[in-house]
Amino acid sequence: MNCNNYEDKIISYIENELTDEEKAQFKSELDSNTDLREQYDEIRNILISLNKMPKAEASSDFMVKLNLKIDNHESSLTDKIGLFFNKIINYDYFPQLSVGVVSLVCLFIVTYFWNPNNNSGSQIMLSNSSSVVDSIDHEIANLDSLDDQDALIILDK
Amino acid sequence: MDKISLTDEELILAFQDGDRDAFNHIVERYKDKLTNFLYRFTYDIDAAQDLAQDTLLKVYINKDSYKEIAKFSTWVYTIASNLAKTELRKIKRRKTYTISDLSTDDREFVLHRSDIESFEDEEDTLVSGKILQKCLNVLDDEFKNIIILRDIQELSYDEISKILKIPLGTVKSRINRGRFKLKDLLKKEGVVLY
């Protein structure tokens, strides 16, 4: 067994990834192979020591400090929004804001009346033209209803 | 409802629904774990606590980013791990700058300062906590991170794979290599391990 095989086997054994048969084989090899035994003990001792390292714990004021950070975050967010509206109210942004609003209104008006896809404007023209056509049709119908004598009277006039 | 019996995932869902008390329970569960995890990176208890608070602050702010598909602990350790990496980079930059600017006596002081400030007492183990921490600090970040997550925080391979965003096979091989590298470093320090 070479060095890499040792490492893989040791870790697999420690992590409990070997089958029962492989475990038994590894154990018997541990008893007979001093190199393997030495490497196994070294890794095992490191893992035990890592596991037993003293645990760092949070201090008693951990929650208080965390709540302070949360409050700071929330107040800074509220501050930013508040500052923006304050500036508007205090007319800091008034010229820019008024130009923006006027531009938007103009843009809306232009788009509303001049957009060819917009039916609202052209509908007025269409309804006007259709009423003219209707009145012509009406006159023709009147003329058709007159008899020849009436027609001659009208022509004489 | 008794929140002690709730899982982490149930607590964060309750917090997403506006239950602030659920967040307090999350903090109680994770404050020590996170402090210990981050202490192994920074070796500075104040910095570790500060980072643990920043981690939980991020949980508070981004609570709606958590989706039920992942384990809550995976999400928390991912945040903490990213904060730790950023902090480590800052510490390294600071140390390179300050140590190169110091006199020889001052350098000696800075290099041994971490030993003096350590709260770790000698435990009844073969390897002392101080020496282990010293060797962990020297270890490459990719190995250090994975050993802390597996052998100190005792997370599963699967969770580590998700936190570090690396395949499961890479996690296993990196843990193995990390442990053997740590063993070599300890031997260099003169520690007899068997």
Image (cartoon, coloured by chain):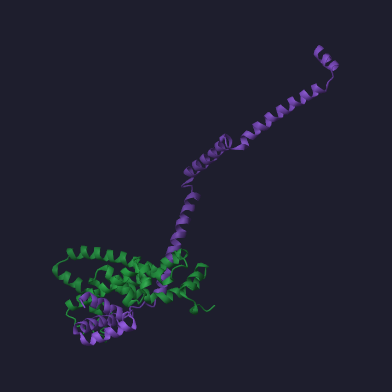
Residue B46 seen anywhere in this rendered image of the structure: no
* Residue A156 locus on image (x, y percent): 81, 11
Residue A117 image-quadrant placement: top right
Left or right: where A112 falls relative to A11: right
Left or right: where B190 falls relative to B119: left
Residue A36 image-quadrant placement: bottom left
* Residue A120 locus on image (x, y percent): 62, 37
Left or right: where A61 falls relative to A153: left
Of all residues, the one furthest to the left in this rendering is B104
Chain A: what color? Answer: purple
Q: Is residue A104 above or below residue B38?
A: above
* Residue B108 locus on image (x, y percent): 16, 72
A7 and B8: which is toward the camera: A7
Q: Is residue B39 above or below residue A92?
A: below
**Which chain does the green colour mark?**
B
Q: Quadrant of the N terminus of chain B?
A: bottom right
Of all residues, the one furthest to the front in this rendering is A21
Q: Is residue A123 above or below residue A156?
A: below
Q: Residue at x 17, y 69 (%)?
A: B107
Of all residues, the one furthest to the top in this rendering is A156
Residue A84 seen anywhere in this rendered image of the structure: yes
B165 and A76: which is toward the camera: B165
Q: Quadrant of the C terminus of chain B?
A: bottom left
Q: Residue at x 54, y 38 (%)?
A: A106
A157 and B183: which is toward the camera: B183
Residue B138 image-quadrant placement: bottom left
Image label count: 0
A99 and A9: which is toward the camera: A9
* Residue A148 locus on image (x, y percent): 84, 17
